[in-house]
Amino acid sequence: MSAPTILTVCTGNVCRSPLLERMLQRDVDGAHGPGRVAVRSAGTGALVGAPMDERSAEILVGLGGDPTGFVARRLTAELVSDAALVLAATPTHRSQVVQLDPRALRRTFTAQEFAGLVAAVPDEDLPTWEEPATALAELCTAARAARGAATRPAGEGLVDPYRQPDAVYDRLRAQVVELRPLLARGLAR
């Protein structure tokens, strides 16, 4: 049986979603061992075949990740269908994911929304990760159940820094640094 997949989604698949992909892969590998959970990314308007944006790659390296070998790809219904959890950069991306595969609604969140929901899940309700596919399904269920208890706003989404000034990349970095421990609480414990 193949490893369950976490799919991260943005527009071009060169800035936000690969940054999340590589960061989360590093974190889940560190917590659960390599190969137990696959983290992938795709873009709704992907710059297919492009490497990771240089400045986003610099952010990733600064956070301990590695952009080597990254290649952008387009979001497809099959990628969505195969994912146990989908983390979208913005509410618009979340909607686009669900339009491709309506069955993904219960396992598709914005990254900020999911982080806030996981933060609201009591420790005893977080999965044990003995079996990753089961853990991801349980985590999605727990996150949905926490919707009424979440105290962190879902936010407008991760800023899109593509071809923007350095200040926008700095904002993206700050958003990712804020999200990382919240996501790790559920995904890398």
Image: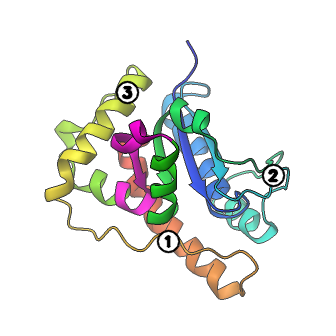
| 6 up-or-down from 54: above or below | above
Q: In this view, does 168 lie to the left or right of 139?
A: right
Asked if residue 30 can be seen in this view, the reply is no
- Find disc 2 in the rendering and name its residue: 48
| Disc 3 + disc 1, Cβ < 8 Å | no
Q: Where is residue 23 in the image (x, y as percent from the top left)?
A: 60, 51
Q: Position of residue 7 (x, y in %)?
A: 55, 43
Q: Residues within 10 Å of mark 3 (few under 14, many from 20)?
A: some
- Find disc 1 in the rendering and name its residue: 175
Query: How far apart in space, not on screen, are marks 2 and 1 (Cα)?
Result: 25 Å
- Which image quadrant is residue 57 in? bottom right
- Find disc 3 in the rendering and name its residue: 129
Type of residue at label 1? Gln
Q: Where is residue 119 in the image (x, y as percent from the top left)?
A: 28, 55
Q: Is residue 35 left or right of residue 88?
A: right
Q: Is the magenta stretch mostly helix, strand or loop?
A: helix
Q: Is residue 171 left or right of residue 164?
A: left
Type of residue at label 2? Val
Residues drawn in magenta: 101-114
Residue placed at 44% from the left, 64% from the top? 91
Query: How far apart in space, not on screen, are marks 2 and 3 (Cα)?
Result: 33 Å
Residue placed at 73% from the left, 60% from the top? 14
For discs 2 and 3, the disc positioned in front in the rendered view: 2
Q: Position of residue 149 (x, y in %)?
A: 14, 58
